Amino acid sequence: MSFSVRNVILVGAGDHLGPSIVSALTSDSHFHVSILTRHSSKSTFPAVISVHRVGDDYQQSDLMSAFQGQDAVVSTIATASVSQQKAMIDDAIATGVKRFVPSGFGSDTRNEKAIQILPQYFKGKRESVEYPKQKEREGLTWTAFVTGPFFELAMAGFMGFDIILQKATIFGYGNDAWSTTTLSSIGLAVVNALKIPEQTANGYMYINSFNVSQNQRRWDAEEQKRIGQEKMSNGNLSGAMSLIRYINCTNGHGGNYATYEKTSNDLLGLPEQNLDEVLAGILKN
């Protein structure tokens, strides 16, 4: 089926990733951009963008109204909201939306080792893609993005780095590389994927800005894994952060997906970035 994407609505535009996608979309005159957000959200958006505010329970009537006339829905909502995303997909189909980008940005959720370690996170992420796959026969197409940790967040402490204090928590020997993508590149990837809908239909787009490793000092990775799992078993969700770091920094768990999957960087026109320049920009800001 041949179609073009011009009208795009973004769900979850106020999170870490949302503003970068909004910026990339609004910078391209090809698209007409709308945002769907909850009444309880305190996020603010450019005045030129149409904003549909709905209740936290995402009522069907509100979704149907917001999705009317849209060609594509891009979701960046939290993994915990995967059940709500399924309802969004159903309503998107009912209103004639042709492309759905699920909230699967981040790790390679198809890696079985990663799922075994942190099913609470990875199963939800995988389900966010599996559901639109099931809807292909109803005319919906989908595109999922594997980006690795968002580079700016990784450098702000998420992956054990603190570039302001020039400190790092290293897992294992720090030699295992992991793939990571800058927020601006993720935004550009989404935009360019929507411009070539036939070439990006019903598949995963593996993208990365850098492959990086930690090699400054050693921590016991298995001990960090044990601590993370113990916290999770006691209902302390902060353990997930340790487990995600372990998964990304330990070979065989999908962190360095660029070694076993062909990236879509060229297809999506992503620029090559200089690591030192990007780090300097983060420090400056």
Image (cartoon, rainbow, N blue to C red):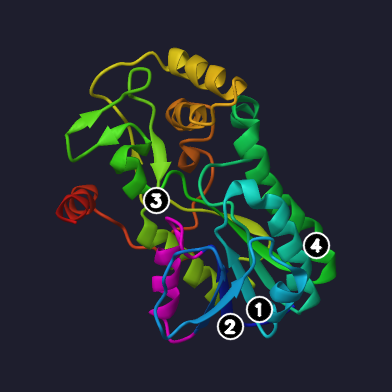
Q: Amino acid at mark 3?
A: Thr
Mark 1 packing: few (<14 Cα in 10 Å), some, or many (20+)? many
Q: Residue 181 got which mark?
A: 3
Q: Amino acid at mark 2?
A: Asn
- Camera-nearest label, 4 or 1: 1
Q: Amino acid at mark 1?
A: Ala
Local secondary structure at mark 3: loop
- Rounded to the nearest angstrom, the CA distance separating label 4 from label 1 is 20 Å
Q: Residue 135 got which mark?
A: 4
- Camera-nearest label, 1 or 2: 1
> Percent x, y for residue 77?
57, 56
- Dot 1 corresponds to which residue? 66
- Camera-nearest label, 3 or 2: 2
Q: Are marks 4 and 2 in contact (CB under 8 Å)?
A: no
| Range drawn in magenta | 13-30
Local secondary structure at mark 1: helix
Q: Which corner quadrant of the image does residue 196 belong to?
A: bottom right
- Rounded to the nearest angstrom, the CA distance separating label 3 from label 2 is 26 Å
Please tell me which residue is depicted at 76% across the width and 70% down the height of the picture.
60
